[in-house]
Image (cartoon, rainbow, N blue to C red):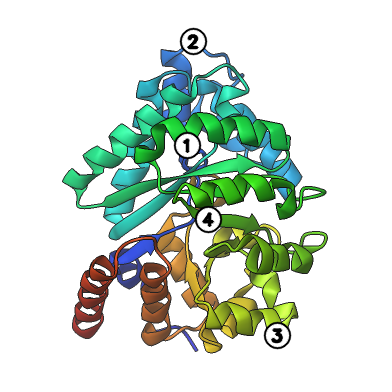
Amino acid sequence: MATEVTPEFTQNLPKAELHVHIEGTLEPELKLKLAKRNHVDIGQESIEDVRATYQYDDLASFLAVYYPAMNVLQHEQDFYDLAMDYLQRAAKNNVRHVEIFFDPQAHTSRGIAFETVINGLYRATVDARALNVDAQLIMCFLRDFSRDSARETLEEALNYKDKFIGVGLDSDEHNNPPMKFFHQFAKASAEGLHLTAHADIDQKDSIEHIRELLEVIGVERVDHGTNIVEDPDLVEFAAKNKIGFTSCPLSNSFVSPFMKGDEILELLSKDVLVSIHSDDPAYFGGYIGDNYYAFADKYNLTKEQVVTLAKNSFEASWISREQKDLYLKELDEYAQNN
């Protein structure tokens, strides 16, 4: 039986995007444009050449393509252009609120100033208001860098605390458990910043890492994290404490043929705040509306289920209760009329 949900329904659905890496929105066209503008030899001459490099079948092979692509990002204007390119796509997907990940260490480690990165991105979030998109930034620590690097990054970032709302944790999880960054999370929390962290699917020690995040570090959201279904006690804890889980079906499909769909639906049925997002859309073949539709199509979701996922995205977001209620009302009206 085919799903009653259409691509138009999921694209126009009012939603929040809580799991998107701005570096992962670098489309081949912009990559080539920035390479030429900044005289960076990327070894690729056409869009087809760039797309041909997007070959990966696990996290490590993806990161081996992902990080070198960032060399074209050199100046504040480049980061602005990157963010605005994404935000225009977000507007077309009726993303009403977005909390965007950025990885400063991926840039400072190659000689780009932290100030250059955050000022370019922040300026785009301000200008996104003209697109009717409310945009905020989340600074992520790279977990395969040292804890000293994370400490230094946080210290510098706090000089710009008015320009981002939280901290996250991403990159290669193998042998890099969340507790490696306990002190950075604690300091960020003490500074009034929100906390989230990746728990990538099917990693070594996945459940132990999720337990650290929920019970010790005290994150408000877990990015990916569907392995939590292996521990019913933790699932109950997550539901009770309204922990958000940001799942990304299209990027999941590169690791699991079933997008972790059964796990998403299990969490949904147990009243966990699981929601759908795009992760690194330039690399995984679709923006947020595409992710909603791919999941709905594969699992024959009802419109009601899709709307619940969108409601969860607002409920798990870091905005005021008043803002949430306004977006939820807009979502209800959309559901009634479509």
Q: CA distance from mark 4 to mark 3?
A: 23 Å
Q: Nearer the viewer, mark 2 or mark 4?
A: 4
Q: Considering only order in the chain, which callout, 4 or 2, is on the residue closer to the N terminus?
A: 2
263 left or right, relative to 202: left
Q: Mark number for residue 195?
A: 4
Q: Amino acid at mark 4?
A: Leu
* Residue wearing tag 3: 232
Locate residue 258, reporting x and y percent.
66, 72
Q: CA distance from mark 2 to mark 3?
A: 53 Å
Nearer the observer, 283 or 246: 246
* Residue wearing tag 2: 39
Q: Considering only order in the chain, which callout, 1 or 4, is on the residue closer to the N terminus?
A: 1
Q: Residue at x 43, y 62 (%)?
A: 290
Locate residue 174, reporting x and y percent.
80, 50
Q: CA distance from mark 1 to mark 2?
A: 17 Å
For the residue carrying disc 1, how many other residues have a C-alpha within 10 Å: few (<14), some (14-19), or many (20+)? many
